[in-house]
Image: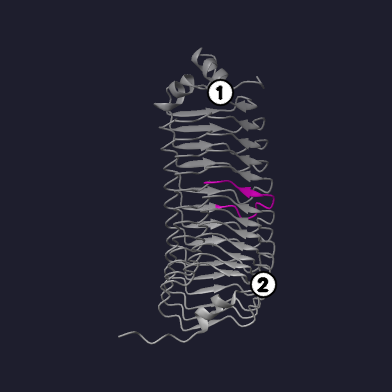
């Protein structure tokens, strides 16, 4: 029986020979099975209408295949504890199981991957604890997309996790806490990973010191996030377009010590209206500040970029509408060649711009900032 699939189990029970019953509230089986595969209409008829609990604890199980439990809309609990050889939860494996509240994976510590859309649309799932899963390598694209009741994701201790895919937790609108401490091999937070997680207020990245990139829209619209400390991330190279855009509660961002950071992308902190402090000290390799990077950061008062000798460009509208910005220090930026149009447009509180030592900046541009205002014409 070691090659049985759920289809075989269903047909076995239907014949009256096995213990797995169709149209049952509870399915509890220990029949050996190496792969749980999708069954299309058979799975729906066996589990969808009546089955609320599914228990499977056999040690031979190593794979839950693509779509295995997809659209089992009555399923509330799944117990896979004891499936010690389980390595993969396949694409769409539990997608759109709208009533799924609990999945017990205790003992499944050989799990290496959670594939695309695995739990997509599981709107009743509240917690996911994977803290002891030291062999987990990847959480793939949209793995938990639109899990709108998910409050906590604990990945602390996933020491081999290297990547979190695009949109993995996108629109998890109840998510408050993400624990990634100890994910020492994590190199990338993918596009839209936490986009529109409006209640996210705690993300623990301590120990993720191999992180090299935070991709487009990674935290866009995380309106409850107040602080982000990345000060020890010496390998961080890029913060991409809109990564923290519209994080309207974000007050401080600490990038001090990010000695390999080369670029801050377009609109990265766009409309972070409460942002008062951006610490870039130590970001000595920074070459560019993208278009509208700090556009509309209306609480930002100072920006110190002195002696950033690798800084080449401050792009169009980079600090536009930073209405509280009083001082911008660019002294010693000896390779700065351009300040884009409208870079400081509508910075109505700006009193001081220090361009001393910006030897490659066109003189006519320097004069715009240093000449006294002309008297108004009657």
Closer to viewer: mark 2 or mark 1:
2
Q: Quadrant of residue 224?
A: bottom left
* Residue farthest toward the front in the current orientation of the protein: 378
* Local SS, label 2: loop
Q: Is residue 114 visible?
A: yes
Let me know if residue 159 is in the magenta part: yes
- Reply above or below: 143 against 277: above
Pointer 2 or 1: first along the chain: 1
- Residue denoted by label 1: 6
- Residue denoted by label 2: 335
- Reply above or below: 217 against 98: below
Let me know if residue 38 is in the magenta part: no
Nearest the camera: 49 or 173? Answer: 173
Q: Residues within 10 Å of mark 2 (few under 14, many from 20)?
A: some
Q: Assess whether mark 1 and mark 2 are in contact (beta carbons under 8 angstroms).
A: no
Q: Which residues are magenta?
A: 154-167
């Amino acid at each position: 029986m070691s090659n049985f699939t759920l289809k075989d189990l269903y047909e076995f029970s239907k014949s009256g020979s096995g213990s797995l019953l169709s149209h049952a509230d509870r399915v509890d089986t220990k029949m050996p099975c190496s792969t749980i595969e999708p069954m299309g209409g058979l799975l729906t008829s066996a589990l969808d209408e009546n089955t609320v609990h599914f228990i499977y604890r056999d040690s031979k199980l190593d794979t839950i295949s693509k779509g295995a439990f997809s659209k089992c809309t009555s399923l509330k609990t799944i117990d896979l504890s004891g499936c010690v050889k389980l390595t993969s939860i396949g694409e769409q494996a539990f997608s759109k199981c709208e009533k799924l509240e609990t999945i017990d994976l205790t003992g499944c510590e050989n799990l290496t991957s959670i594939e695309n859309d695995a739990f997509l649309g599981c709107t009743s799932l509240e917690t996911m604890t994977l803290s002891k899963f030291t062999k987990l390598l990847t959480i793939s694209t949209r793995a938990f997309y639109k899990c709108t009741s998910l409050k906590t994701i604990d990945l602390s201790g996933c020491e081999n996790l290297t990547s979190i895919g695009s949109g993995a937790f996108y629109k998890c609108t109840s998510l408050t806490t993400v624990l990634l401490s100890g994910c020492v091999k994590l190199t990338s937070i993918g596009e839209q990973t936490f986009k529109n997680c409006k209640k996210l207020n705690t993300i623990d990245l301590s120990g993720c010191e191999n992180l090299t990139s935070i991709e487009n829209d990674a935290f866009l619209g995380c309106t409850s996030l107040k602080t982000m400390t990345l000060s020890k991330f010496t390998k961080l190279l890029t913060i991409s377009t809109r990564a923290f855009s519209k994080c309207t509660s974000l007050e401080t961002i600490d990038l001090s010590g990010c000695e390999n950071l080369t670029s801050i992308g377009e609109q990265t902190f766009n409309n972070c209206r409460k942002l008062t402090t951006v610490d870039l000290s130590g970001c000595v390799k920074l070459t560019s500040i993208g278009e509208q990077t700090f556009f509309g950061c209306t609480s930002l008062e100072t920006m110190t970029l002195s002696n950033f000798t690798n800084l080449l460009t401050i792009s169009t509208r980079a600090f536009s509408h930073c209405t509280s910005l009083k001082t911008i220090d660019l002294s010693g930026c000896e390779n700065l060649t351009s300040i884009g149009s409208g870079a400081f447009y509508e910075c109505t509180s700006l009193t001081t711009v220090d361009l001393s030592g910006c030897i490659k900046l066109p003189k006519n541009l320097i004069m715009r900032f240093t000449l006294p205002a002309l008297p108004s014409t009657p």
